[in-house]
Image (tube, rainbow, N blue to C red):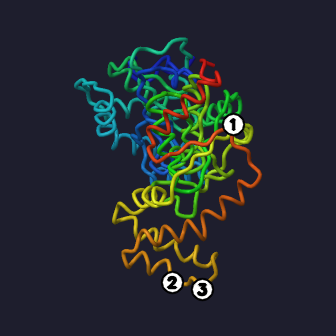
Amino acid sequence: MAPESPIPPAFRGEVPTVTPAQALAAPQRCVIDLRSPVEFSADHVPGSRNVPLFDDVERAVIGTLYQQRSPSAAFAEGAERTVERIGSLTREIAGAVAWDVPPADLESVVERMCAGGVEALDRDLSPVPLDVLPDQAVVLLCWRGGLRSRSVTAFLRGLGLDRAVCLEGGYRAYRRWVRERIERWEAPPTFVLRGLTGVGKTLVLRELEEIRPRWTLDLEGLAGHRSSILGMVGLEPCTQKTFDSRLAARLDEGFVGPCVVEGESRKVGDVILPPVVWNALGGGTSIELVAPPERRIEVLREDYLARERNRDQIAAQLPFIENRLGKRRWAGRLVELLHGGREDELVALLLEHYYDPLYRHSEKGRDYAVTIDTSDPRAAAERVAEWIEGRGAHATA
């Protein structure tokens, strides 16, 4: 006969769980990620909030105890840290989900929940899958849906937050969902915006999303990179896992008919496009975007040089381009133009000697179905939409 549990009845029993697909489909759910900051920064559910149960150092200490001593030693250390942290953690979650914490001795509750050890706590918190999420669900997750998230979910529910649920399988299950969601994507009729650097492909793509919502797939926006040697300037490039998460979320939204995407190489910065997306680009209908040289210079100047803080990043990358063009002739020349305030001359030289030759080589032999001027990005987006609709490719997929 099992000994009586030290856990107060309100804080033990069934812990409702939901799958990643259920959680992501819920329109008004709030996702609370209990993992450490370093785990969260590597990747997380888009829109989730990091409220770590342990910080990076604490997580490392507990992991070392688990590996070198025993699960019980790791649990004891984790319990002690949780008692210290529980007040601020509860208040932070409450603030994120608009919930008032009832008066209670939170530290005492945690001590009683942990008093029986890891096996007893695991026994007293039984995961039970839900068919339907509660309204405004608060979905808590840890690395693998273990005691870290189950115990916090039970704790919050015991305090009266009945909409708290646990993500079954944790981040690992979410990561599997991301991979599977990407792999099973079937691209609708795809149209690829192509053109020389500076014609404003991204500007047109984003204008198109304004006038035809859910038509576009902005790969550079998802990656935080413009897909060139200067592509990170002024942006925040992301990891492959974060890109995959953002991409899966966008694909899960679906497309209202066609998919319009900017032409890219297989890599966008440091992230690699998955095969289904790369194949869609390769099999899509190419639309050529063009603009006069002065407009291209204007676009690039505004994109890269409008912010003073971008200049140091540009200056750090220009020597690479100088070496590619020929060190003897170009060493220091581009950097000198930048520091001398001769931005238009710098951009013109980069286009003529570096970007345009690279692009023309990559596009050699490609056929374009239509050519559209992008001097006015909004007008160009409207022309793209009209042309696609004229082909009958706009019907809802």
Measured from the top left, where is residue 260 in percent x and y? 59, 35
Front position in the image: 61 or 6: 61
Reading the image, the residue beneath label 3 is 329
State the SS at label 2.
Answer: loop
Residue 332, disc: 2
Residue with the mark numbered 1 = 285
Residue occupying the far bottom of the picture: 328
Mark 2 vs mark 3, CA separation in Å? 9 Å
Horizontally, residue 15 falls left or right of residue 361, namely left
| Residue 73 seen in the figure | no
The Cα–Cα distance between marks 1 and 2, rounded to whole angstroms, is 41 Å
**Mark 2: amino acid:** Gly
Quadrant of the snapshot with the C terminus: top right
C-beta proximity under 8 Å, tags 2 and 3: no
Q: Nearer the viewer, residue 242 or 221?
A: 221
Mark 3 or mark 1, which has the lower sequence index?
A: 1
Q: Position of residue 31 (x, y in %)?
A: 44, 31
Give x and y (percent) for residue 321: 58, 73
